[in-house]
Image (cartoon, rainbow, N blue to C red):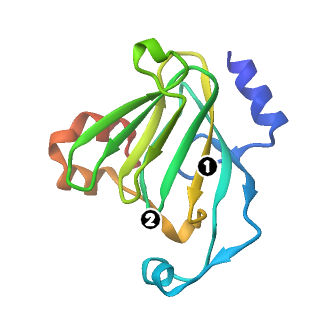
Amino acid sequence: MQEEAEKIINKLDLQPHPEGGFYKQTYSSDEKAGDETLLKKYKGERLYYTSIYFLLRSQDVSHLHRLKSDELWYFHSGSPLTIHMIHPEGTYEEVKLGLDLDNGEVPQYKVPKHTIFGSSVNKQDTFSLVSCMVSPGFDFDDFELLSKEELLEQYPEHRKVINTLASH
């Protein structure tokens, strides 16, 4: 399965992502939004939406981070993936992204804006290939990679997931 992951990384020309895993932007809207409401929430104009491929191998994790926008996740292939979330009010939730609907997996999920989240592959020696769409479009100015120290200080009750998914 690792060979299959490497083949997909190469064929799709995926690059390392700062949060972990590999990605490539596949689409961004031709139009930008910048009305007064949007400008109050974001610095400058934003594309209406952007979309990426995202591949996570079993040995990788998507480190805990936060976005100012909602992010839609779509499962494509490989192992199911778990999206780990700490909601703004501090509750923890996990969602299994995959195709085994009888066992609670979902093929699509929206991570709400301002939620701290990361992901991990559910099985060993494999990978998960998903797509993620952000609206308003993704911009690194709206991306916050959170440290283990700051997360443990704010959410000590979620020590296990923080120790597993937080960056150093």
Disc 1 + disc 2, Cβ < 8 Å: no
Mark 1 is surrounded, within 10 Å at the Cα level, by few (under 14), some (14 to 19) or many (20 or more) other residues, namely some
| Residue lying at the far top of the rendered structure | 102
**Amino acid found under the numbered disc labelled 1:** His
Give the image location of residue 2, x and y in percent: 68, 19
Residue 68: which disc? Answer: 2
Q: Is 99 located above or below residue 150 in the figure? A: above
Give the image location of residue 30, x and y in percent: 77, 69
How many labels were placed on the picture? 2
**Residue in front for this viewpoint, 25 or 160:** 25
> Quadrant where the N terminus lies?
top right
- Which secondary structure lies at badge 1? loop
**Amino acid found under the numbered disc labelled 2:** Lys
Residue at the spot x=59%, y=37% of the render?
74
Whether residue 8 sits left or right of residue 158 in the image: it is right
Give the image location of residue 144, x and y in percent: 44, 62
- Which secondary structure lies at badge 2? loop
Residue hosting label 1: 17
**Residue in front for this viewpoint, 2 or 55:** 55
| Residue lying at the far bottom of the rendered structure | 36
Q: Quadrant of residue 32?
A: bottom right
| Residue lying at the far right of the rendered structure | 11
Residue at the spot x=50%, y=83% of the render?
39
Residue 42: which disc? Answer: none
Q: CA distance from mark 1 to mark 2?
A: 18 Å
Mark 2 is surrounded, within 10 Å at the Cα level, by few (under 14), some (14 to 19) or many (20 or more) other residues, namely many
Q: Is 67 located above or below residue 54 in the figure? A: below
Residue at the spot x=45%, y=22% of the render?
105
Give the image location of residue 10, x and y in percent: 81, 35
Q: Earlier in the sequence, mark 1 or mark 2?
A: 1
Whether residue 119 sits left or right of residue 85 in the image: it is right
